[in-house]
Image (tube, rainbow, N blue to C red):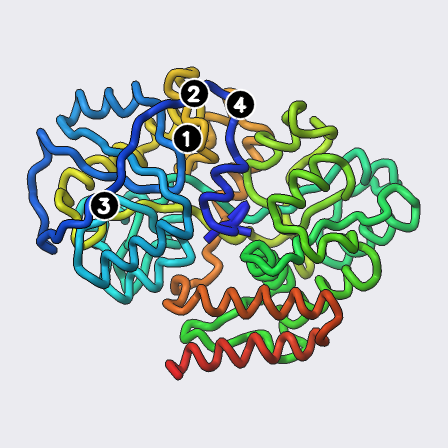
Amino acid sequence: MRTIHGRSPASTRSARMLAAVAGVVLVTSACGGSTASSSGSGQTTGVTITVALAADPPPAAVLAAFTQQSGITVNWVNIDWDSLQTKISAAATAKTFFADATDVDWSRVGQLGKLGWFVPMEKYIDTAATKADVPQLSSFTSDGHVVGVPYDASFMVTTVNEDLFTRAGITAMPKTMTEYTSALKQLKSKGVSQYPLNIPFAAAEGLSTYWYQTTNAFGGTVLDGTGKPQFTDPGSAGYQAAAWMVDAMKTGLVPPGNINVTDSQGEQTLMAKGQVATTFSDYSGVVGVLYNDKTQSSVPSKTQYLPTPGVDRPTVNLSNPDGIGIPKEAKYPDAAAKFIQWFTSAQTQQDFAGLSGPSKTWSAYTLPSHLSAVQKLATAGGLAQGQVLADLLKTSKPVFAGGAPTWYPKFSNAVYTNLHAAATGSMSTDQAIKAIAAVAVSLSSGS
């Protein structure tokens, strides 16, 4: 899930990432609940497919053009992310129709794949050939099958207010965690930023994803391939990451009020207002659509992406993209596949991102999943620090190498609940780590 899904869910990210472009209007209707054959119909023309996502629809003219070229009419249904996941699970469990194409969030890939609720997308798309231009496709693979296809790109990035760093006398941007921590202390000691670091310590998904990226920066992973915790040893990356985050709160590097701040709130009220100097785990695209937007930000053109500091050099960034797939109970799976082929193509993504003018721009769209599309945006100057984003996307990697475990939601809840408690002082970092590990061990063992 993403916050933006901290990540909170994908719907949060979409809502926050709205671009200042022409609005879109399309009447949507609720999905039906009738029972459908698991095999569905192979018909691909003269049919109406239901597409359910946690986002406003693309421009009506764009969908109309798709209908004209394909003979497939799209009934777009916008459902908030949490309700959408509930409906997907309920319909799959009851083997009833919900949608022909719907959300496959990175955090649900393991669950959806292992339960066999979605049609393997390699049946319809040459995923092997697509992988080079869509790096985050690997985040949607479970048990050798591609559960969904990413329709946008999202990865965790480090953002810094370059103006504040310069005023603090920091002439070279940090490349390691040691240098980054020293920079934070210098920003504070010089009186440039009383609380330089934004960490969303509210008990929500954004806190979990922040910890994953910080663990990655310390050179490790959270879970192994079997779901066993890799963060219990005090010398492990996950343990160090949790200690670093909690210590930053206790030593005054993080605003005290952040104990109840979510990731999106921190972006909008802290980073965008110059109240903090940096967010270690932020979201790709946020500089252009928020920090550089004069209607929302008081620090336009002062914030930049920083290659995420690592142990001895910058590290790669973790992915948390949104995908789209075909439920096993879809009425028109072949027609849905044609829609997904079009919807996730590089050309359509370029249109959505604004390269073909306002009439084709999708206001709820964030960043193309195709490297080629991101590169074209960067070259055209239509994406803030586009080349940096293209480079970071190219090397981004999944949070969990084998896909998120089926029990990910329960694990994430344990992560953000206990890290929040450690930040409030109601438990120690060691106690929080042990509590999170106990949940992971229990869930991975099936007990």
Label 3 sits on residue: 99
Label 2 sits on residue: 355
- Judge the density around disc 1: few (<14), some (14-19), many (≥20) Cα neighbours within 10 Å: many
Label 4 sits on residue: 20
Give the CA separation, mark 3 to mark 1: 28 Å
Residue type, label 2: Leu
Expressed as whole percent of the image width and height from the top left, the position of residue 247 reads: 77, 65
Q: Horizontal placement of 374 versus 150: left or right?
A: right
Secondary element type, mark 4: loop
289 lies above or below 8: above
> Can you tell which of label 4 and label 3 is closer to the viewer?
3
Residue type, label 3: Ala
Residues marked 2 and 3 touching at CB (< 8 Å): no
**Nearest to N terminus: mark 2 or mark 3:** 3
Residues marked 2 and 1 touching at CB (< 8 Å): yes
Give the CA separation, mark 2 to mark 1: 9 Å
